[in-house]
Image (cartoon, helix red, strand yellow):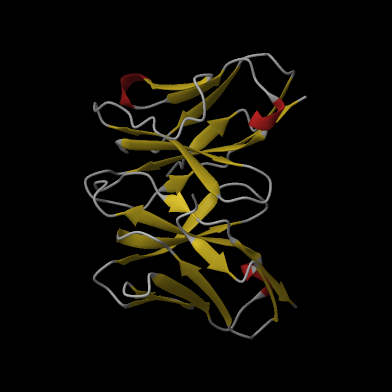
Amino acid sequence: SQQGEEDPQALSIQEGENATMNCSYKTSINNLQWYRQNSGRGLVHLILIRSNEREKHSGRLRVTLDTSKKSSSLLITASRAADTASYFCATDEFGTGANSKLTFGKGITLSVRP
Amino acid sequence: GAGVSQSPSNKVTEKGKDVELRCDPISGHTALYWYRQSLGQGLEFLIYFQGNSAPDKSGLPSDRFSAERTGGSVSTLTIQRTQQEDSAVYLCASSLGQDQETQYFGPGTRLLVL
């Protein structure tokens, strides 16, 4: 079954606006990661947040993690047309050991209109 | 430096034929992962190699699927007697291991079974 579930499934915004994407998961985790995918090909790692962290920043990205609600959010500030892509959250399930498989959600399609 | 490479980029085959997909991980990465992504879906874990340990094959969908990793580097995913439902993008990723959780993905192999 799907561990991570993102919402919304699709998001369309104007360039310059902020984009917020949410992810929920079911089990205890070691960490949660966000990836980006262009044109159905390889994924690019964006940011990792550990289970003992609540918020993390990287450039225009801000990710939060609420382990009590088993949810995370990814905020992209001042969006650009080049941010148009699919975004996936992935969890590394607690107890399966470091570097074990990631469980991905189905992804969010973000469209940023110029 | 060179990233994860996969070959072929695209593969069209007839139902019932065997196919081999190749992955060259980043040099020095001890962990290697195979995932499958069907159209519009998230990534489905297939198999995970870590150093010389026995691989985690828990995601392989049937006994028609197998994978090897020779010399701790290059990996081959083999699908025997392909079926139309095997059509998908097959993604390989590698990571440093040693508690470095970020996975670096290749561009994928797009498989179409006619």
Q: Position of residue A102 (x, y in %)?
A: 40, 49
Q: Position of residue A89 (x, y in %)?
A: 48, 61
Q: Residue furthest right?
A: B114
Q: Position of residue A65 (x, y in %)?
A: 36, 74
Q: Residue at coordinates 43% horizontally, 51% vertically from top-left?
A: A103
Q: Position of residue B3 (x, y in %)?
A: 46, 42
Say left or right for B104 vs B91.
Answer: left
Q: Is residue B27 visible?
A: no
Q: Is residue A106 visible?
A: yes
Quarter of the picture containing the C terminus of chain B is top right
Residue B33: quarter of image = top left
Residue A99 drawn above or below residue B54: below
Q: Residue at coordinates 27% horizontally, 51% vertically from top-left?
A: B100
Residue B96 drawn above or below residue A4: above
Q: Residue at coordinates 62% horizontally, 47% vertically from top-left?
A: A41
Q: Out of A62 and B14, give the one closest to the viewer.
A: B14
Residue B112: quarter of image = top right
Q: Residue at coordinates 26% horizontally, 31% vertically from top-left?
A: B51
Tally of numbered tags: 0
Quarter of the picture containing the N terminus of chain B is top left
